[in-house]
Amino acid sequence: MGVLVRRSILPVVAVIVAAVVAGASQRQLFRSGVEVITVAATVRDRDGRLVKGLEREAFEVYDDGERQPITQFTKDRVPISLGVLLDISDSMFGQRIKDARAAVDRFLLDLLTPSDEFFLLAFNHAPHILTRWTNSPAVVRQALDGLRPQGGTAEYDAILAALPLLERRSKPRASLVLITDGADTASDAKLRDVRATLLQNDAFVYAIAIDPPDQMPINTRVNLVALRDVTDSGGGRTEVARNSDDLIAATAGIVEELNSQYVLGYNTPRPLDGQFHSIRVRVIGTEYRVQARKGYVATPLPRRK
């Protein structure tokens, strides 16, 4: 599951409140007089099963190798703002776009909760914002029904185009889900641009790579190495879907992770030096695997509007 790291420089920065405090904004998950790093973490056992119900005392957090006191913690589900980035290049024509539309429809409208919000962005040789923030079934289905695959694949440009929308979200957590069946062939941005930008953003990214077993030219197939380079360092992951059943299972698995995350916070000991600082989260005395953001760049994020 994805991981969220958030730097706060606002005069009043967020403090964990357990679930919903009457009259408080859902975005006010953390509030403190100092700068806080927040990390959304998923915990799995050695068999890959999600581990739920852990308490604050079970966790340790390290910043550049130094253990930090966990000052804020919740194991309750925190509402999320989620962007779906859907490939509509010409290779998605036919059954693939039908399967993708059905999976996205179920993902957003059946599996997320009413407290969440989402937007849709389609991309071929350029990104196309289909909806702004919504949780309306009618808006989503109208946008999905109008999709007609054509053109190349600019997935790096799509990720960068989606990030400004996340700055205007209303929920505490943020994530992107990229669904694509091909390697990037049309972006102006490079992979290094995407990685560098994500380090300064609090969103974690998932990717669903549609990679059917039928023969395709090697240069048009999904680049799993590049996708994992985007997703894994930020606390997300890449799923491979060979068929329509895999695609539905992948979206359901992502939602299950989102519903099972822990959110931890600690007071950063670092100055705003513009440098990368590593983060490691572990569960004490276990072999559990923690999926979380691996670090952050110590620069202030712009205020979301």
Image: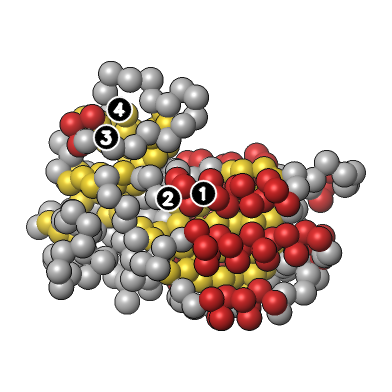
The residue labelled by disc 2 is: 258
Q: Is residue 111 above or below residue 125?
A: above
Number of other residues with Cα within 10 Å of mark 2, as a class: few under 14, some 14 to 19, many 20 or more: many
Residue in view at x 67 percent, y 51 percent: 247
User: Does label 2 or label 3 sit earlier along the sequence?
Assistant: 3
Q: Are marks 3 and 4 in contact (CB under 8 Å)?
A: yes
Q: Position of residue 202 (x, y in %)?
A: 37, 55
Distance of label 3 from label 4 (alpha carbons): 9 Å
**In the picture, which quadrant includes the C terminus?**
bottom left
Distance of label 1 from label 2 (alpha carbons): 6 Å
286 and 9: which one is in front? 286
37 and 298: which one is in front? 37
The residue labelled by disc 4 is: 283
Residue in view at x 61 percent, y 43 percent: 239
Indicate the secondary structure of the residue bearing disc 1.
Answer: helix
Q: Are marks 2 and 3 in contact (CB under 8 Å)?
A: no
**In the picture, which quadrant includes the N terminus?**
top left
Taking the image as drawn, is residue 109 in sight? Answer: yes
Q: Position of residue 102 (x, y in %)?
A: 67, 63
Residue 304's image quarter? bottom left
Is 214 on the left-hand or right-hand side of 209? right
Number of other residues with Cα within 10 Å of mark 1, as a class: few under 14, some 14 to 19, many 20 or more: many
Residue in view at x 82 percent, y 65 percent: 93
User: Does label 3 or label 4 sit earlier along the sequence?
Assistant: 3
Residue 254 disc label: 1
Residue 104's image quarter? bottom right
Count of residue discs: 4
Q: Are marks 4 and 2 in contact (CB under 8 Å)?
A: no
The residue labelled by disc 3 is: 54
Distance of label 2 from label 3 (alpha carbons): 16 Å
